[in-house]
């Protein structure tokens, strides 16, 4: 739920491509003259993980979109999420949620607390840039990502407002 709230809130409503996300990203690009946010779905990101390409072009993005539709036709949404969390990069040379949970917290993924899962999922947006082990600035960037994700989780009903406020205070004080 947390991953979907953060990366692709309409994941269960589209078939691999999200026209609304593409429209938002295109509008932001035109308005700002630079990429502000992407329009990739979780399925498109999985397609990129399965077939990595150094090339960043419209043709590469189009191939990723075609692959995403193919993936959606062959796999269930649960299978797509399972594959994504087991292939995605969590920073510090850790691929997959199981490796990341052991690396960062010394526990298996199924034992993660809400705050630990919040840390890991918020890492996905910029695993290298906001690596909290790199610098104070990187840690501050990661904290902002965690607060953003926490807000999305509260809005999606994944966590109550009271629980979110408690976690928010811990993040701001550096305890989480």
Image: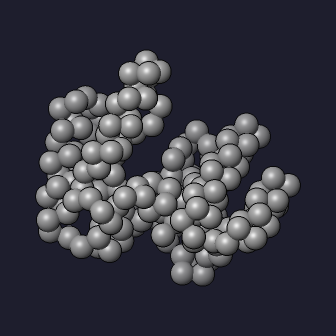
Q: Residue 140 vs residue 16: left or right? A: right
At x 57%, y 57%, the residue is: 152
Which residue in the rendered view is the most extreme toward the top?
33
Can residue 28 be seen from the camera position used here?
Answer: yes
Quarter location, residue 84? bottom left
At x 76%, y 70%, the residue is: 162
Q: Residue 171 vs residue 153: left or right? A: right
Residue 58 in percent (x, y) is at: 22, 30
Q: Residue 65 vs residue 172: left or right? A: left
Residue 118 in percent (x, y) is at: 61, 63
At x 77%, y 63%, the residue is: 165
Say above or below: 7 vs 158: above
Q: Nearer the viewer, residue 43 or 123?
A: 43
Q: Nearer the viewer, residue 41 or 109?
A: 41
Residue 145 in percent (x, y) is at: 62, 48
Quarter location, residue 136? top right
Q: Nearer the viewer, residue 153 or 121?
A: 153
Say above or below: 114 vs 165: below
Quarter location, residue 37? top left
At x 24%, y 38%, the residue is: 61
Q: Residue 169 vs residue 17: left or right? A: right
Q: Nearer the viewer, residue 56 or 165?
A: 165
């Amino acid at each position: 739920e947390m991953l979907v709230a953060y990366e692709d809130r309409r994941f269960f409503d589209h078939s691999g491509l999200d026209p609304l996300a593409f429209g938002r990203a295109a509008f932001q690009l035109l308005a700002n003259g630079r990429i502000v946010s992407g329009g990739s779905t979780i399925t498109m990101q999985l397609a990129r993980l399965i077939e990595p390409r150094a090339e960043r072009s419209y043709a590469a993005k189009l191939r990723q979109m075609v692959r995403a539709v193919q993936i959606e036709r062959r796999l269930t949404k649960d299978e797509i999420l399972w594959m994504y969390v087991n292939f995605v990069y969590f920073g510090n040379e850790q691929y997959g949620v199981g490796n990341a949970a052991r690396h960062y917290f010394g526990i298996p993924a199924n034992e993660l607390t809400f705050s630990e899962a919040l840390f890991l999922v918020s890492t996905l947006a910029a695993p290298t840039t906001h690596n909290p082990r790199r610098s104070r600035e990187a840690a501050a960037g990661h904290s902002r990502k965690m607060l953003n994700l926490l807000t999305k989780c509260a809005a999606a009903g994944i966590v109550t407002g009271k629980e979110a406020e408690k976690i928010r205070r811990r993040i701001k004080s550096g305890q989480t």
